[in-house]
């Protein structure tokens, strides 16, 4: 099995077999992201991908979950997915789930029939990171899609029978949009109605456009309290019907878990305790990307 460059996956895919079917991200413009900056996007050679699957099947026949990388693997041509998904099922008899990162654009560009076919082939979970529901913020971070795009993409994925895991980014609006960012993000979560919801905390990475903006005084991260306030607003105001909520990513100051809306009050009171300084936060030196 061969991998090119640095590899990334969601925390919940820690025990999954990672199949690198695409290299990089087809968008690769978000101002805060350095994950795939060194890579030029392309689909990997399909024959090499299928060989990887065969090898992984021989080495790890008990695999139950597969995460298809890199940054927005849903963009891969449907013809390639048609070859990859049956090969995964054949190689891993206990396979329960295939997932990948997707942008709203990836979803909107695929037809309803194609999405349904991919779902029937086993692709059952998409990780979509709008980061914010605030259109001003989305434009500034060059996300490439709007609130409405994300809402439509979620609806389309659900109509195809897929589950979605939505990722929000605390701090993405900077100091000046912190309130709008949190409010609109809560509204977008309600619209997207994800099965899984997680929040990450923005780290400004040297070498990114956002870092250059920060150096020029054009972007300022909210304080830790401000970031917790954003999280509080998102939890308190969003209304997903049944979402598993996590902030267990290493970038976060506060690790929370529960179900929304069931555990909303408990989670909000945990955030309030943290805001009052009654709960220890993750120290800066333990935070990661
Ligand atoms: S779409 Fe995702 S992987 Fe691609 S540049 Fe934006 S944040 Fe990075």
Image: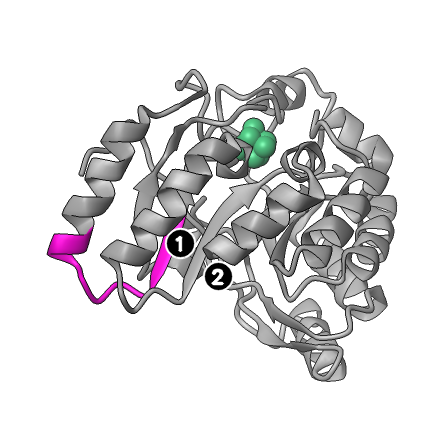
Residue 78's place in the image compared with 200, above or below, is above
User: Percent from the top left, x then y, of residue 241?
Assistant: 77, 73
Q: Is residue 151 left or right of residue 94?
A: right
Say whether mark 1 is within 8 Å of ligand 1. Answer: no
Along the viewing direction, whichever of 182 and 242 lies nearer the viewer = 242
Label 2 element class? loop
Q: Which residues are magenta?
A: 57-67
Q: Is residue 49 left or right of residue 83?
A: left
Tell me the distance, in whole angstroms, between the alpha carbons under discs 1 and 2.
6 Å
Residue 17 lies in the magenta-colored region: no
Along the viewing direction, whichever of 175 and 102 lies nearer the viewer = 102
Residue beneath the point at 42% across and 47% down: 288
Residue 131's place in the image compared with 216, above or below, is below
- Snapshot quadrant of residue 134: top right
Label 1 element class? helix
Provide the residue designation for mark 1.
286
Graded by Cα atoms within 10 Å as few (under 14), some (14 to 19) or many (20 or more), the crowding at tag 1 reads few
User: Cβ–Cβ below 8 Å for labels 1 and 2?
Assistant: yes
- Snapshot quadrant of residue 32: top right
Residue beneath the point at 76% across and 26% down: 140
Res 171 seen here: no
Residue beneath the point at 53% across and 70% down: 280
Q: Quadrant location of the C terminus?
A: top left
Residue 25's place in the image compared with 134, above or below, is above
User: Percent from the top left, x then y, of residue 116?
Assistant: 62, 51
Residue beneath the point at 80% across and 45% down: 152
Q: Quadrant location of the N terminus?
A: top left
Provide the residue designation for mark 2.
282
The number of discs equals 2
């Amino acid at each position: 099995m061969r991998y090119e460059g640095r590899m990334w996956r969601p925390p919940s895919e820690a025990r999954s077999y990672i199949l690198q079917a695409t290299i990089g991200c087809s968008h690769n413009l978000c101002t805060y992201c350095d994950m795939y900056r060194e890579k030029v996007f392309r689909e990997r050679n399909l024959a090499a991908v299928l060989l990887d699957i065969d090898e992984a099947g021989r080495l790890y026949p008990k695999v139950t979950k597969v995460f298809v990388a890199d940054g927005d693997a849903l963009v891969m041509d449907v013809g390639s997915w048609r070859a990859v998904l049956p090969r995964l099922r054949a190689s891993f008899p206990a396979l329960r789930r295939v997932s990948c990162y997707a942008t709203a654009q990836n979803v909107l560009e695929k037809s309803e029939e194609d999405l349904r076919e991919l779902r029937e082939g086993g692709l059952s979970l998409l990780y979509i990171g709008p980061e914010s529901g605030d259109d001003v913020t989305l434009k500034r971070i060059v996300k490439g899609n709007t609130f409405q795009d994300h809402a439509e993409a979620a609806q389309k994925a659900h109509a195809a029978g897929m589950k979605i895991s939505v990722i929000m980014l605390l701090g993405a609006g900077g100091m000046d949009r912190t309130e709008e960012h949190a409010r609109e993000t809560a509204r977008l979560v309600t619209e997207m109605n994800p099965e899984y919801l997680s929040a990450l905390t923005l780290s400004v990475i040297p070498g990114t456009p956002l870092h250059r903006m920060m150096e020029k005084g054009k972007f300022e991260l909210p304080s830790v309290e401000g970031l917790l306030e954003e999280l509080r607003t998102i939890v308190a105001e969003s209304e997903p019907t049944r979402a598993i909520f996590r902030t267990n990513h290493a970038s976060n100051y506060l690790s929370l878990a529960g179900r929304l809306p069931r555990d909303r009050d408990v989670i909000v009171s945990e955030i309030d305790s943290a805001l009052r300084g009654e709960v220890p936060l993750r120290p800066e030196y333990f935070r990661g990307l």
